[in-house]
Image: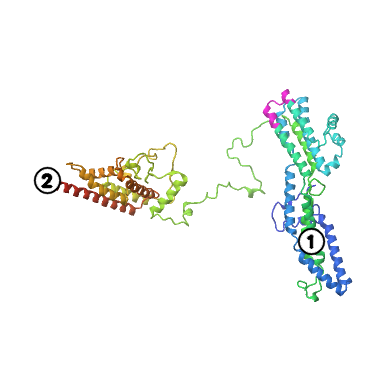
Amino acid sequence: MTVTYSSKVANATFFGFHRLLLRWKGSIYKLLYREFLVFVLLYSLFSFIYRLVLTDPQKRFFEKLSIYCDRYAEQIPVTFVLGFYVTLVVNRWWNQFQNLPWPDRLMFLISSCVMGQDEQGRLLRRTLMRYVNLTSLLIFRSVSTAVYKRFPTIDHVVDAGFMTIEERKIFENLKSPHLKYWIPAVWFTNLASKARKEGRIQDSVDLQTILTELNKFRTWCSTLFGYDWVGIPLVYTQVVTLAVYTFFSACIIGRQFLDPTQGYQGHDLDLYVPIFTLLQFFFYSGWLKVAEQLINPFGEDDDDFEANWCIDRNLQVSLMAVDEMHMNIPHMTKDIYWNEPDVRPPYTRAAADYCIPSFLGSTTDMSISEILQNKDVDTSNPRGQATVLGRMRRLLSVQEPAELHTRPSLKRHSSDISSFLPFGPVHHFHPREEEKMHTHSKLHSLRGNFYPLSTVNEVTGTSASPDSSLHTPSPDKIPSVVISEDVSESVEQESSAQVQEHHGKEVNTAQGVTDTHSRKFGRFSPASKIKRNQRSVQQSRHSSVSSTKSFPSPKDVQRRNQQQETLLQQTCGTADSSSQEKQQRQNQES
């Protein structure tokens, strides 16, 4: 007897619920009017006694009692207790509705998997579905008072056609102290297994699927039985009921209008009718009535489940699906959209406003100007831009653009000089003029070609083109190398000693630098200088790694070039002075 009003609230209108307040069936007025009348009569009785029966000393005592009841009645947590209790009851009520047994999935499987259009096949399918409906009927008889009134005995079940006389004898001969709703499910499984052996069910997978769905159906039935067996703890229901009725019992005395001449706080007005007290009783008691009605939805209240209707519907639909509709398929014809690639069903004039275009995303209509409208992009600082691109590469694992320098490898392979310097070996300590011009031109092109919406190329397993493949940078693409001060000082100290060791050999500037370079970082360094060399090399590596975190600016490139030229001039000057001293010494000896 569920009260349905969905069509009345389909659209939100002005005072859309006002029509629902005038309904009687399933309303709060129908549930609460008796308790409400009792509360009003008791309140009126105490008010009549206070005003007309009691003497003045008795009135003073009643007034003190009223103030006391009104003060301490507010300490009863009615709102908290009722809110938690009603929430628990509503969740329980909805879970029971979700576990109502529906045989639709089973009837689909039986109609499609149990073959045979002869009398035996028809009997097999109808018997299977009758066992399914008998299982749900036995459960409904045990949990619903309305269903039990309809089928009070097994004889009524037999008369309704859910069970045959022979099946009734077998059912009653099975002695069990427990509820025997599961017996028809066992009959179903045995009959399905027999149909598989006879070839009515052609595949074991189909049999397994049917049995799986039967287990789900039995689970729904057992869940309803469990909800009926284990309810909300009685102590909680008692606490909620006592809290509500105790609160309003105190309100009968505590909410009385006292004599205004006595000057009691909050009693300076005498209205005779406690309007807000009556509303509070209406709301709190109505809240409790909601829990009382939903705690067992298989009763006979207006909002309880229609268990008898479920039984009738399930039997009618399931037998029709497995009998009349078995392999009764309409003739296939071409639909009206057979030659139309763009399928558009028609709309009536009343529904024309609901024909809307497809949603393609909130950014579909955005343009580049809208993206950059409230965002100022500073393209004058390539270092900041490079930092942003560096973060993007680390997060997205993408390859940097072709015009930017490739990230150097910092892996240690041997004691070769290339493993210590961040950008590979330096082939020319004296950069040529064309290399300088090429470096500055690339930096200027980087600044000019950087756009706010520029993208980067993704790294794939195989290179899409030779330009995108990873390769060792050519010497003209290698940025300037920064050598730490410790390294430069050690180079100056060792260069003179190395020149003195070459007896009678003339070395030019490039050879002196190369020897200095190899003796400093080579694997044949003297043991006394290893510790100092390693410390200077670690400092050089630390500075080089920190320099690779972002792209160098033009000022940094120019400053590094100047430092490199100064270092080379000092090294070459030291080598020249050592050569001159050696030449003078040889001249004096000769």
Image position, residue 68 (x, y; %): 79, 68
Instruction: Provide the secondary structure element on which disc 1 rests.
Output: helix
Relative side of 184 to 574, left or right: right
N-terminal-most mark, 2 or 1: 1
Q: Position of residue 331 (x, y in %)?
A: 68, 30
Q: Is residue 233 visible?
A: yes
Mark nearest the camera among 2 and 1 is 2
Label 1: how many Cα within 10 Å (few below 14, some 14–19, many 20+): many
**Numbered disc 2: secondary structure:** helix
- State yes or no: residue 207 in magenta: yes
For the point 33% across and 48% down, the residue is 536
Quadrant of the rendered image containing residue 14: bottom right
* Rendered image: mark on residue 589: 2
Residue 116 visible in the displayed image: no
Q: Which mark is residue 247?
A: 1
- CA separation, marks 2 and 1? 125 Å
Contact (CB < 8 A) between labels 2 and 1?
no
Q: Residue furthest top?
A: 198
Front-most of residues 213 and 342: 213
Q: Find the residue positioned furthest to the front.
A: 528
- Give the residue at the far left of this rendering: 590
* Amino acid found under the numbered disc labelled 1: Phe
Q: Is residue 116 above or below residue 468?
A: above
Q: Residue 19 falls in which quadrant of the image?
A: bottom right
The structure's colour scheme is rainbow
* Magenta segment, prevailing SS (helix, strand or loop): helix
Q: Position of residue 558 (x, y in %)?
A: 31, 53
Viewer-side residue, 32 vs 108: 32
Disc 2 residue type (three-letter): Glu
User: Residue 77 falls in which quadrant of the image?
Assistant: bottom right
Tag on residue 131? none
User: Which segment did they paint magenta?
Assistant: 194-210
